[in-house]
Amino acid sequence: MDEKRKILIIDDEPDLLKVIKNRLESWGFEVFSWTTGAGALKQVLEIRPDLIILDIMLPDINGYDLCYKIKKTPEISSIPVIVATAKQEWQEDMGDIGRFAKADDCIPKPFEPDILFEKINKLLSK
């Protein structure tokens, strides 16, 4: 039996986490979640997910900073990161800021599940 691909979602919105987690599990992924930036790097190191979905507006750290830390940590730097935000002003600059933070892709909130699925599959097939 094939091992399920692991996805870690780092987002502080419990309702959104539940919806995304349920959808990803229905697509056959093993899903982990974390609600703050504190300890998130440790979670990534422990779980070693195949992909991370990272909210930009966390209560204690900017998601771009966390993404940058993940990408600068050699043993986890190759894990694809999709950054997401609902903040309209940030959505306009997401691509530029995301590239600076070394994010692999970005998605504005709210997003269509099919678009997220496409992005996940694209990154996991590389």
Image: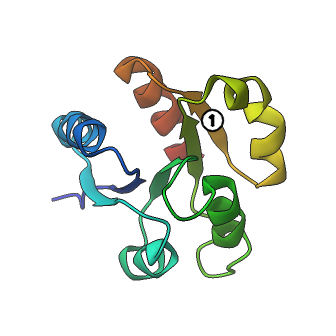
* Figure check: 29 above or below 27: below
* Figure check: 125 above or below 46: above
Q: Which amino acid does the dot numbered 1 rest on?
A: Cys
Residue for point 46% across, 72% down:
40
Front one among 30 and 103: 103
* Figure check: 68 above or below 58: below
Left or right: residue 32 versus residue 22 is: right
Front one among 69 and 120: 69
Residue 86, horizontal then vertical, whole percent: 53, 29
Q: Residues within 10 Å of mark 1 (few under 14, many from 20)?
A: many
Left or right: residue 85 versus residue 34 is: right
Front one among 50 and 95: 95
Name the element at disc 1: strand
Instruction: Determine the image quadrant of residue 2.
Output: bottom left
Which residue is labeled 1 in the image?
A: 106
Left or right: residue 49 versus residue 25 is: right
Residue for point 47% across, 54% down:
51
Residue 99, horizontal then vertical, whole percent: 81, 45
Residue 109, horizontal then vertical, whole percent: 49, 26
Left or right: residue 25 versus residue 95 is: left
Instruction: Determine the image quadrant of residue 105.
Output: top right
Residue for point 68% across, 26% down:
91
Q: In which quarter of the image is the N terminus?
A: bottom left
Residue for point 68% across, 71% down:
69
